[in-house]
Image (cartoon, grey):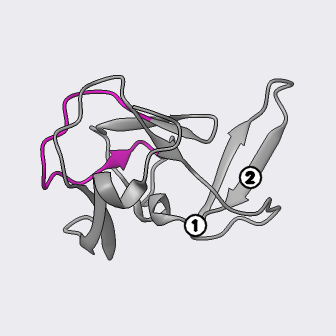
Amino acid sequence: MSNRIKLSSLFYVSHSPIHGRGLFARVHIEPGSFLGEYRGPPSREVDTYVLWTQDENDRWIARDGKNILRYINHSNEPCAEFWGFDLYATRPIHPGVEITVDYGEDPAA
């Protein structure tokens, strides 16, 4: 998939059985597919839609998500993962399946 993919052609936001609203696949997605970039302004806050990752110098950087990828919920058995701010499918994803990632911590803690 191209880096210029239109997120609304792949995903929709709906009620999630996991938490609040979630992001769901519109189409079948193959493992390893690029799903999009988590976009938003830089942040220094720990907040609901802020994604933290490490840069090439192992420094923590964050973005306050403003696109629909901000609706991704946590799962211990995710179907996608972030490499930096880029999201990739880790297994086949069928239409209607919620897009999830492992937040890397116990979200109930």
Please name the residue that numbered disc 2 is placed on: 62
- Counting from the top left corner in percent of width and height, residue 79 is at 29, 37
Q: Which residue is drawn at 40% across and 44% down?
A: 101
- Counting from the top left corner in percent of width and height, residue 57 is at 86, 25
Q: Callout 1: few (<14), some (14-19), or many (20+) C-alpha neighbours within 10 Å?
A: some
**Rendered position, 82 above or below 22:** above
Dominant SS in magenta: loop
- Counting from the top left corner in percent of width and height, residue 91 is at 24, 27
Magenta segment: does it hold 100?
A: yes
Q: Which residue is drawn at 36% across and 23% down?
A: 32
Is any atom of residue 79 visible in this view?
yes
Q: Which image quadrant: the N terminus?
A: top left
- Counting from the top left corner in percent of width and height, residue 70 is at 49, 63
Q: Check contact, mark 1 vs mark 2: CB within 8 A.
A: no
**Rendered position, 74 above or below 68:** above
Please name the residue that numbered disc 1 is placed on: 49
Magenta segment range? 88-103
**Which quadrant of the structure image shows residue 20?**
bottom left
- Looking at the rendered structure, the secondary structure element under dot 2 is strand
